[in-house]
Image (tube, rainbow, N blue to C red):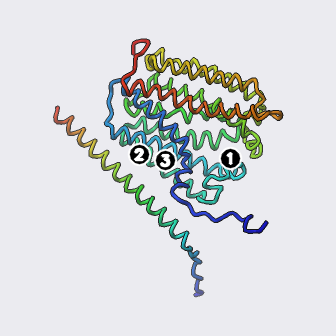
């Protein structure tokens, strides 16, 4: 069986790696922010619902 | 000249490039008008929204606007590369790959609509989704390169934020919300056509049928005046429904009269024409700049009245 050649993976240079790392950091922060927002909204909705049921 | 000067410098995308992809200046106007609608709705109906939920709903509007902007830049990257005004945008400058721009637009669209739904209600989320579709598909893909009325019909996309803000608070969209929509709708053509008088050669170069390209500068200047004259009574409608009070009324009259004065001056000028002088083009630029101030100030008056307890309507609210 003939061997398939290894795919050519482009090597990133220093500045490209640093730029990618910075982008990854921002992406991570954005994801964390999104999770935080959903969590906060869930708490507020639960509290509001609890307040409504208390008054019933 | 050496070859090194002719080859564009390789750029690596930064967070700022991705932010620019989302058209932050348009985003500011969208957020401002959306927030004004949200505050006015609360003040007019007495329905309150949790401040954190209101902040997240406003963020969702901002993200929705940014997502539509990214989709627009993805689709228009071919013509952006040719026009000098837009050639430094993230895609034509080589900082952000086209596919990434589309992915960003689609993902942020989904996130913004979801956030809006969680923070408020399905109606506001549906309106936000539709406004993204309106700008990203109806305007960008269907109208912009097809008709000289692209800005008139497409202006609806930018007019949605106050309706979305209103719906986020109350869950419905009454006449007052649509009046705010109408103000932005009729403001968009004179605002954008003033810019297109300055950039009509660039639009002609990429065959985008903006009004000055298809009908000439004179027709465009006349249309700017007509829309500005129509905008004046439309901007006074909030006085009739009680949405606007004395402060708003004074602002609408003063700002409207100034906008009309600019439009009249522009209609008498040669701006955008082949024999236009520097003063003519400066007037077109000043009209464009004033139009931005006009909308900020008008919605600022709405915000001031309803957020600061200065709402004294001429008719019973």
Q: Chain of mark 2?
A: B
Which residue is pictured at 41% across the width and 31% down the height?
A: B38
Dot 3: few (<14), some (14–19), or many (≥20) neighbours within 10 Å?
many
* First-in-chain label (1 vs 3): 1
Q: Which residue is mark 1?
A: B85
The chain ID associated with circle 3 is B
Are the residues under badges 1 and 3 in a single subunit?
yes
Q: In the rendered image of this protein, does residue B188 appear above or below residue B244?
A: below
In primary-sequence order, the first of circles 2 and 3 is 3
State if disc 3 and disc 2 touch (CB < 8 Å): no
Secondary structure at badge 2 equals helix
Q: Earlier in the sequence, mark 2 or mark 1?
A: 1
Please tell me whether mark 1 or mark 3 is closer to you in this view.
Answer: 1
Q: Could you say where residue B236 lies in the image, as x and y percent from the top left?
A: 53, 18
Per the image, the residue denoted by label 3 is B109
Furthest-bottom residue in view?
Answer: A1
């Amino acid at each position: 069986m003939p061997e398939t050649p290894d795919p050519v993976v482009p090597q990133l240079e220093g500045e490209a790696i640093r730029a990618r790392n910075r982008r990854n950091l921002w992406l991570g922060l954005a994801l964390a922010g999104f999770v935080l927002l959903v969590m906060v909204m869930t708490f507020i909705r639960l509290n509001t619902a609890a307040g409504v049921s208390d008054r019933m | 000249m050496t070859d090194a000067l002719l080859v564009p410098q390789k750029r690596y995308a930064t967070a700022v490039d991705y932010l620019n992809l989302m058209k932050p200046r348009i985003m500011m106007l969208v957020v401002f008008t959306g927030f004004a609608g949200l505050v006015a709705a609360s003040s007019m109906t007495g329905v309150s929204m949790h401040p954190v939920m209101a902040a997240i709903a406003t963020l969702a509007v901002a993200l929705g606007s940014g997502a539509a902007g990214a989709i627009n830049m993805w689709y228009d990257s071919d013509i952006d590369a040719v026009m000098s005004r837009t050639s430094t945008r993230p895609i034509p400058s080589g900082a952000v790959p086209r596919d990434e721009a589309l992915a960003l637009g689609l993902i942020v669209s989904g996130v913004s609509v979801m956030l809006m739904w969680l923070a408020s209600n399905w109606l506001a989320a549906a309106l936000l989704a539709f406004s993204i579709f309106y700008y990203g598909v109806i305007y960008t893909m269907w109208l912009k390169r097809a008709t000289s009325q692209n800005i008139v019909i497409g202006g609806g996309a930018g007019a949605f934020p106050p309706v979305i803000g209103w719906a986020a608070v109350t869950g419905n969209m009454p006449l007052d919300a649509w009046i705010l929509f109408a103000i932005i709708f009729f403001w968009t053509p004179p605002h954008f056509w003033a810019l297109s008088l300055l950039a009509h050669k660039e639009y002609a170069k990429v065959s985008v049928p903006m009004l000055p390209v298809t009908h000439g500068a004179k027709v465009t200047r006349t249309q700017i005046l007509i829309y500005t004259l129509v905008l004046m009574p439309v901007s006074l409608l909030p006085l009739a429904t009680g949405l606007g009070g004395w402060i708003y009324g004074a602002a609408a009259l003063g700002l409207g009269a100034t906008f009309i004065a600019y439009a009249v001056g522009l209609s008498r000028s040669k701006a955008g024409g082949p024999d236009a002088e520097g003063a003519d083009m400066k007037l077109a630029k000043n009209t464009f700049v004033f139009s931005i101030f006009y909308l900020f100030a008008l919605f600022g008056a709405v915000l001031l009245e309803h957020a600061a307890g200065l709402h004294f309507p001429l008719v019973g609210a």
